[in-house]
Structure formats: C-alpha cells, structure tokens
Image (cartoon, coloured by chain):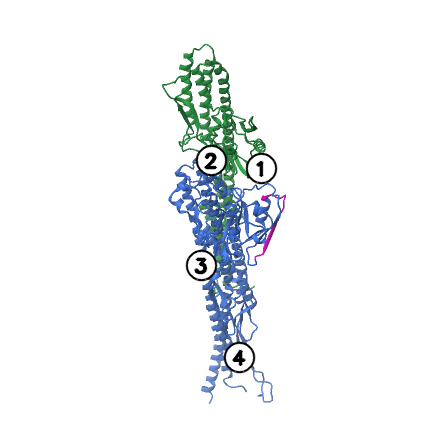
Chain colours: A green, B blue
Amino acid sequence: MRVTQSMIHNDLVLTLNRQKNSLEKVENEISTGVKIQKPSDDPVGAANQNILSSRLNEINQYERNAGDARDKINLIDGNLGQVTDIMQRVRELAVQAANGTNSKFELSEPIAREIEQHLLALVDIANGKDSTGKTLFGGSVIERNSFVAVYSNNVTDGNLDNGRALSGVVYQGDILTQKREIERGQQMDITVPGNRVFWGTNMTIASNTDASNYVARGNESFAIDGVKIDVAAGDTLNEIIRKINNSPVDVKASIGAQNDLVLTTKSPHQMWLEDVEGSTVLQDLGVIDGNNPAPGNNISASALVTGMSMFDVIIQLRDDLIRGDQNQIGGRDMEAIDMAMDNVLRYRSDVGARENRLETHEKKLASDKIYTQDLLAKNQDVDMVDSIVQLKWLESIHGYALKVGADLIKPTLMDFLR
Amino acid sequence: MPSTFMALETAKRGLNAHQQALQVTGHNISNADNKNYSRERVNFTAMSPLYDPAMNRASGAGMIGQGVVISSIERVRDNYVDDRIIESAQGKSYWEVQQRYFEHVETIYNEPGDHALRSALDNFWNSWQDLSAYPEEYGHREVVKTRAEELVSNIRSTFEKLHNLRGQADFELQATVKKLNTMGAEVADLNKKIIKSEALGDRPNDLMDRRDQLIQELSQMADISVSRSDAKGLIVFIGSEVLVQDGVLNKLTLKPDASNEGYSKIYWEQSNTEPVFSNGSIYSLMHMRDTVLKEQVDKMDLLAVNLHDIVNSIHKDGFTLTGETNIEFFKLESLSREITGNADLNNDGQNDSSAVFKIAGNNQLKKDRPIGISGLLTFIRNDENHTPVQISYRENETLGDVIKRINKSGAGVVAYMDHNDHLVLKGITAEDNWQKNFIIRHIEDSGELLVGFAGMLQNSGASGAYDYRRINEIQKLQAGRENITFSPVLHAAGSIALSDQIINNVGMIAATGGKDIGGTGDNNSPNGQKDGQNALKIAQAMRHEDVMVGKFNNPEEFYNDLIARLGVESRESKDKVEGSDMIMKNLENMRQSFMGVNLDEEMSNMVQFQHGYNASARVMQTINEMIEFLITRLG
C-alpha cells in the first residue's frame, strides 16, 4: 500500500491525542481523588453516587434525630424517677399514719405538712421543662404550663397555713405525642402525655342523660383519646357502645342504670373526649358540655365523674390526715397510692424500653453509615496506587510513541540527495 | 531525408516536456501538506511518428519518432473513497455536536457533587426534619427558609442555563445554515467554471479539488450525497432533494417558528417546503434544540410544578406559629388569570380552555380496602390525537390497585393518595405541545369511583366528564377551590419562588398540624406549638411518600433518573464520536494513500525529470554543434 507523509502524520497525531486524553483523565483522578467527575464518566456509577450520597445524608439526619430523641427520653425517665421517689416517701408516710398510735396533732401537723410539700414538688416535676425550656408533659402545648394548681380557702377541717391549700391540679396540655423519624417510615414517640402518667386511678364518666331514644342523625364521628370512632346515621346507643368496645381505645363502654352512656378506662388515665368535625354525638349523649366542647376538662356538669389523678390521690390523703381518719388512710388511700405508683412504674418501664430500642437503633444506624460510606468510597474514591501505576504506564507509552513518531517523520529522500 | 532541424525540434520537445513535468512535480511538492490536494501525474506520450502510412509518404526508413509530449496531467483521485468519507462525515459531525452540548448540560447540572441540585434537595429535607423536632424555634425556621431559597434559586438558574443553551443551539443552527448556503453557492460557481474549462479541453484539477473540499465540508452539515453522472457537473443532494444542480443553488432560508418559542425553522426558499434532514450537524442541532434540551427544560418545569404543589398542599393544611392556616410556602403564577381556571391556549384573545393541574377529591379513603364498585374510567393521552385511554375498575380491587394502573397506563394523568388520604389526579408533561404541559385533559367515570366514592366529579358518564377543551369546566368538579391547583404559566422553573409571607416572616412556616373543628372541611384549629407533624409530613413527601412527580414516585426518584439518563446519553455520544474518529481516520488514510503526495516519490521523480531535462539539453547542444559545424565549416 502506498503510504504518504500525511498518513504517517495523521496516525501520529491521532495516537498522541488519544494518549493525552487518557493522561489527562488519570491526572484529574489523582489530583481530585474522585473517579467520577461527570455523569458520562460512568453513568451507572454516577447514579449510584447520587443515591448513596443522599442515603448517607439521610442516615446522618436520622442519627441526629435519634440522639435528640434519646436525650429527651432520658430526661423524662429522670423526671419519672423523681416522681417514683416522692410517691415512695408519701407511701411511707401513709403507712406511718395508718399505724394506730398517732394522735390527731401528729397526723395533721408534721405529716400533712410534709405531704403538702411533696405535692407541690410533684406539680413542679409535672411542669418540668426540657433542654430548650419547653414543657415536657404537656403534649404539644408549650404556651402554658402543663399542670396548674387550683387553690381553695376551704380545705376540710382547718386550714394548713391560714388560708390557701391545694384543692386540685388541672391538666392544661393535650394528648399529642412528639414524634421523631428515626428511619424511613419509622417514627418514635418520645414523650408521655401528662394526662396519662400523672393519673392515679381508673376514670369513669356516666353521662346521667337518658339516651334510650337517641338516634344518630347523620354520619358523625367522635374521638376518645385521639381514636376516631365513626357513627352512621341511624345508630342507637347500643351500636355506639359496640363500636367503642370494638375499637382499639383502652376505654370500655356500657349502659348505665338510667340508660345512659358509661365510659370506664381500662388503665388509669384522664379520658380525652371530643366531637370531631362538627359532629355533636357526645354532646347529644350528655357526656360533653355543649358550651365548652374543646377537650381537656370539657365534661358536662350533669355527668358523674369518678377517678383521681395522682395529685387528687395525695390531696385525698392529706385531707384524711387532717381529719384524722386512720381507717381511710390505711384502706382506701393506700390502695389509691398503690395504683398511682403502679401507673407511674408502667410508664417508666415503657420509657425504659424506648431507651433500649433507641440505643439499639443508634448502633444500627452507625453500622449502616459505615456500610454506606464504604460503598460510596468504592464507587467514587480513586485507588491512588492503581491510578499512579496507570499514570506511569501511560507516560512511558507516550514517551515511546513520541520517540518512534519523531524518528518516522524526520527523514526524507532530500536528506540523502546531494 | 528528414529536416535539418528535426533533431533540434525533438530535443526541444524533450526539454519542454521535462520542464512541464518538473513544474507539475513542483506543484505537487508545494501542496504536499494540502489535505484536499490530489496529486497530479504527468503522462508522457511519444509524439505521432513520421510518416503516416499513406500514398504520399516520403521514402526512407520510418517511422521516425518525433520526441515526447505530455498527453495529460492526470488528477489521481478515487471518487469512491470520497463518497464513503462524505457518508461518514455526516455521522461524525452529528455526534460531535451532541457530545459538545451534552458536556455543556453536564456542566450545568454539576453532578455528582455537593453543591448542586441533589444537595439542595437533601438539605431542604434536612431542614424540615429539624424543624419538626423544634417547631417553636425561630432558628430552625430561618434554616428552612434559607434552604428553600437555595433550592428554588438552584432550579431557576439550572432552567435559565438550559434555556440559554437552547438559544445557543438555535444561533449555531442559523450560522450553519448560512454557511451551507455560502458553500453551496461556491459549489455552483465552481460547477460552471469546471464545465467551461473541460469544454475547452483543459483539466481543471485544482478547481475540482476545491469543489471536493467544499462538498466534504457540506457533508458535515447535512446528509449530503453526490451524483457524478451528469454531464453538466456534480449534483449535490440533501437526502433526496437537490441542493446544487449545474450552476444553480437551491437556497435554504430560516424563519422564526411561533409554535417553538420563536426558534428558527428551515425552509427551501423556492418552494417554501421543509427540507428533510437525517444526519449531519444541522440535524444534530435541531435534535439537540428541539428534543434533548427541550426535554431537560421540561424536566425542570416538572420538578418546579410538583414541588410547588406537593409542599403547598401540605403546608396549607398546617398552622403557623401564630395559629394561621392556608398559607402558601411556594409561589407560582397560574396560566389562568381568573378564578374559573379558564385560559386562552391558542392566543386568540378569547378564553377557550380550562387549565387545571391538580384535582383532589373531597372524601377520605382507605387505600387498601376493596372499593366495592365497578365501572370504567376514561382519560386521554397527552397527544394531538387525544387518544382515549380507558381503565376499568372492579369491586374486589383496592384503590391502590386502581392508582397503580392509572399511573402505568400512559393516560396523561397520574394519581396518588395525599397526606389526608384523599385521591388526587395530576397532569403531566404534554407529548404534543409544551404549551399544554401540566394540564389535566379529560376525566370521565362511568361509575361512582370518582363521583360518590372519591368526591371529585359531580356526575358520572359523558355528561359529567371534565374536559379541558371547554371553559368553566371546574363547575363539573365536586372538589372545593382549595383542592384544585391551576396549571402554571409557561416555564414554571423560571419563576418558582418562596411566597412573600414566608420571606417576610419565618413564623409563617406552617410546621404544626391541627384539626377541623365544626366540620368546615378545612383545618381551622391548631395543635400546640410543640407539634411539628406538618413539617414532618412535608419532609416525608419529598422522599418517601408516593406523590408522583410525572411518572416517578417522588422528587428523589425523579432526580436520580434524570442524572442517570443524562450520564447514559452523554456517554453514548462520547463513544460514538470516538468510533467515528477511528472510521474517519481509516478512510482518510485510504484516500491519502491514493491521492496524497509522497515526498520521497516526488523527490525521485524530480531527480529523474532533471536528468531528462539535462539529457535533452545535451542532445540539443550536440545538434547545435553539428549544425554549427555544417554552417561554418562547409562551403
């Protein structure tokens, strides 16, 4: 085949160009440490890079969330621990008082006073704040204290301090829990609402309104403890009771002596009742006060309510001490104290279980993170040794090509003609 | 007896011939580096000898040779390889343009990396997560606002750069067409000259070289082919239409196309028809401008429209720090200027269509329960033909099944369940005309699924169908005004921004959830300030919920696919260019092998001709001496 100078030249230029391209690519890799500069360098790798980086960012966020959650739960646990300690002390005092050897003075003065102090301490703990100064036990309500003490001048049989003493503690929060997302689609509750943990005995609400002729007008709904219960048009009281009992809420419904609706909690907590989206079912049944339907202290005045919060239990004990009623102290009051303590313990162990779960979860996140970082590195990071060896190899090839090329393009016949 | 001076004449002819040969050699040598030059070869022929066999021939030994003449200066060229090169140049040029522009696009997106759109989306998600933990804190709100601003400004700037790149492609297209016209004119001119010259018996080698060079350059621009069989010169075709014939050029002209944002459309000037390109840089630029880049711009618009709607629909259900609701987070201008959703799509000054992007039903539904009803849904595809797409549903299917089928059907809408468990239908990118992007075209239900079940349409059947080609169609919908989102103005990605309320006061970010007291159909009572569930819902919608961005489940999936596709297409163009380079190099070498100048060959020719010249000169000298002797010595 006939070969001309320009053919040799073409070949040489094209080859050198390609080598230069490879050299540039490797140099880039080494100086940036990054294999994939643009998606076209490695489309599949670039797509993986995208997904993995996003996932790593996600894991970091979840770690933050989980750490924050654990801090909060620790704090709650600590608070509940203090509550348990106080309840323990109150119980001891009750035992001591129930012991028949005390005089009325001994009951009312030192013991009752101490119990009053413990009560105030409990209210403080119930209004406890987290690291940013927001209330811990109020659900989502942080604009005001979770619990507010109600004072009265008429404490039974004698006033403790010339006047006012606590006659009750009202819950001002709501029942929403705070959630943190700790993994895709996994959320964890990190608070305990005050209407549950600071409750003592089971609560019963009997509406006292005859509902035998009640028929639901249209499709309505109401919510107990945040669980929505739908009522269809034409439902009578029996149907509604059945629906409540079939739902997952831990409240039992039944018909009372006056054909009224009776709701009883299955475990101690303050029931949260509301009519939803314009319905009036609970109002019509006489459970909720029509003038004040927003939940939290919205029970109708005509309804019969029994059940005590932890504070109510202690107030009852204090009042019995002032009256000197040792029978009640040893009987009814002790029982109530025990129930309250059991309730707190139940939530403490729940909180403890959550702590454990978070710890395990954090460990899992940490190992996920390492795994993802590993994959990312494999995908993206340049293996320096590899690249440098390749660089040297390319450089030497380039050198050979240059030398051969130079030798080829130089001589022509002209050099040899005289 | 032959003439006294015959030998002299012979020697003279020898000198002439060799001188000419040297001239040609010199021409070859000086054009050794001219890639388009085909070497010339002199053909020596002996002159017609004396005497012709005829009755009146002179007597004596014959035939007597008369020396040498140059019968032709031959141009050594292989037209077959030329034609192969013309074919390959088209493909190479096509892929080179694609590769160049794809590199630009990759630079615009700047992925993989930590400072581009993916990071902005990730950071946006992070900020809502952090806000959901501390919704009462101003600091976290400021971060949400900042991250949102980064996100929209990233989208806007990516859109602008892509849009400008389209303009650049258009500009290059115009310049290339003009260049094609200029070169075509020169080819026509050369045709004329070459024909004249050949008619006169000359070989216009250099003119033909120039013409071949022009044709090769033309072949980079379009799918050129050449017919050499015509006696009146080369005919140059684009596809099957004539560009140059004889000395006449069929010019191409450019006119702005209003249906394509004013970008240029190419016409034959004479017949006003559109030429058909199928290869070369002009075709590549048109493809890049009208398909590839337009798709990228459409994708940015899709992201912007859906981001705006997904975030706003959740945000409006939530509550601000001060307990207000129905606040928009992003703002985007609607196509329709009226509350009826009517718009003027054909720009004749009259409203002619309903431009709605999203419709949410009124009723809360469960995705995984059997629907218990059956019927037939009718949608239409987003193409010019308005092809209907029908989807049937049966009693034992769940709503989730029906949604999946709608999304896979190519129906021109996508469906999902929103954060309130309502059924939602959304428009997507148009297949026919980008001005109709993100408009729901047709919704019809023969049964109750969209009517009583989901609460979207008021009536079943064709009379209750919603169709965008009529005005005031939102009256056919049951959905309340806050459940309808109007279609955005053209190029949502260029105008998406944070709403003014958020910019002025980050307390307006609705992180808190709430409830509907009194059955108004809208949330009106906020939860306590510590509740951040609305912020959490927004975060989840960005990554993990099915909210449908086009046919992708959420913005995260959408963007991953965008980058993956970009990488593959860009890589393809690079690989094709490399392959074309190799092919061109081989063809070029084949051609050079045939027509190229080999300096060594020319050198030895030169020596040879020089000797020939010297020898002829010596003969002349000898004859000269002989004649001189005859004249001066005899007589």
| Real-space CA distance between mark 1 and mark 3, rounded to the nearest whole angstrom | 70 Å
Q: Element under label 3?
A: helix
Mark 4: amino acid: Gly
Residue range corresponding to the magenta coloring: B386-399
Q: Which of marks 2 and 3 is in front?
A: 2
Q: Along the line of sight, which residue is nearer the eye, A301 or B500?
A: A301
Chain letter behind tag 1: A
Q: Label 1: how many residues lie within 10 Å, few (<14), some (14-19) or many (20+)?
A: few
Number of labels in the image equals 4
The answer to whether B60 appears left or right of B618 in the picture is right
| B150 magenta-colored | no
Q: Name the residue under label 2.
A: A65
Q: Label 4: how many residues lie within 10 Å, few (<14), some (14-19) or many (20+)?
A: many
Residue A234 tag number: 1
Judge if badges 2 and 3 mark residues of a common chain: no
| Real-space CA distance between mark 2 and mark 3, rounded to the nearest whole angstrom | 47 Å
Q: Name the residue under label 3.
A: B168
Q: Along the line of sight, which residue is nearer the eye, B112 or B625?
A: B112
In the depicted structure, whether residue B179 falls above or below residue A214: below
Residue at screen point 50% across, 16% down? A331
Mark 3: amino acid: Gln
Q: Nearer the viewer, mark 1 or mark 4?
A: 1
Mark 2: amino acid: Asn
Percent position of residue A24, x then y: 46, 51
Q: Element under label 1?
A: loop
Percent position of residue A237, x then y: 57, 32
Q: Label 2: how many residues lie within 10 Å, few (<14), some (14-19) or many (20+)?
A: many
| Real-space CA distance between mark 1 and mark 4, rounded to the nearest whole angstrom | 128 Å
